Amino acid sequence: MENTSLCVNAGGITLKNPVMTASGTFGYGQEFHELIDLGRLGGIIVKGLALKPTPGNPPPRIVETPCGMLNAIGLENIGIEAFIQDKLPFLKGFSTPIVVNIYGKTVDEYVELAARVDGEKDISGIEVNISCPNVKAGGVAFGVDKCAAADVVERVRKHTSKPLMVKLSPNVTDIVEIARSVEDAGADSVSLINTITGMAIDIYKRKPVLGNITGGLSGPAIKPVALRMVWQVARAVKIPVIGIGGIVTAEDAIEFLIAGATAIQVGTANFINPRATIDILEGIESFMEKEQLQTISELTGSLKI
């Protein structure tokens, strides 16, 4: 592996390798430090952060499904200030880029979060979660409307010089349209896909299993959908695409790279195997060695049609 480079540029964020963690599945990073070497990761994307601490949804909040998991955590988090004061100092001890995932219920909340993060030199970038309900638009998610999605990104772009990664929702008719709109609005990269809305029912109680009724489906069950969307978006935009959705093995990650992803995020697999990120990284390294590939770019977008 001496002559092989795993380094990639994810829209202005330099990653030593393409393996990142998916927001909401890796806590604030510190939770995993006794299980894996955080310094080996390409990037750490922390749990989604709001302006103020958020308790999340009532339980039950997680249910296992065939080949996946439904979650309705409700974006529980400690808030941006507590993260910067209590969690960021620990993460600064590693050479791994830290990306903060932000979300809000109004555009102004997104803007305020971005402005607050902008002053933190130890944060390498911002991932903007636009799968959240816009309270001023009747609860419709920002990410399902191209104009609303573009508005968030355009406003946030004016309040930070940090690289902006925009996390796209798959719960749309045309994800390419949304991707192009946020690219035009100033996104430096896009990450996809977020979870697919689903539900589970207890047939004996005849009630929803989740306290929130519906939740986000993740895990291997959504991988074919995620892979298809990454392929479509990668062909339609000029900015880097970060692939997410059901990545459990190195082979899964490599599929996303071949489909056009510059980097990938590992999510639900972290719950199954806390070492999943490192196993995937080592698997990519082995594959490149076997295939005599020198750089990740030789894989990215190499699908033959």
Image: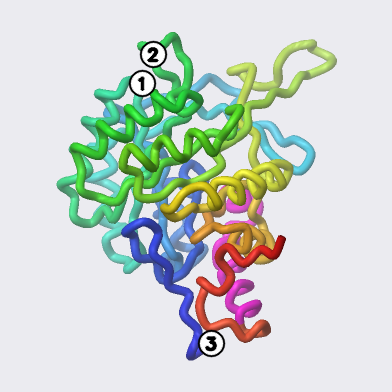
Q: Which mark is residue 1?
A: 3
Q: In the rendered structure, does residue 273 fall within the stretch colored magenta?
A: yes
Number of on-image labels: 3
Q: Is residue 31 above or below residue 39?
A: above
- Please give the name of the residue rendered at 78% of the width and 19% of the height, measured from the top-left corner: 202
Q: Which mark is residue 135?
A: 2
What x and y, as percent, mark residue 64?
72, 36
Q: Is disc 1 surrounded by few (<14), some (14 to 19) or many (20+) residues within 10 Å?
A: some
From the viewer's perspective, is 82 left or right of 303? left
Q: Amino acid at mark 2?
A: Val
For the C terminus, which image quadrant? bottom right
Q: Which mark is residue 105?
A: 1
What x and y, as percent, mark residue 173?
61, 27
Q: Amino acid at mark 1?
A: Lys
Q: Residue furthest bottom?
A: 2
Q: Amino acid at mark 3?
A: Met
Q: Is residue 2 visible?
A: yes
- Please give the name of the residue rendered at 32% of the width and 20% of the height, measured from the top-left corner: 106
Q: Is disc 3 surrounded by few (<14), some (14 to 19) or many (20+) residues within 10 Å?
A: few
| Badge 3 vs badge 1, beta-carbon distance below 8 Å | no
Q: Give whichever of 43, 57 is nearer the camera.
A: 43
What kind of element bears circle 3?
A: loop
Q: Which residues make up the magenta segment?
A: 267-288
State the CA–CA distance, disc 2 to disc 1.
Answer: 6 Å
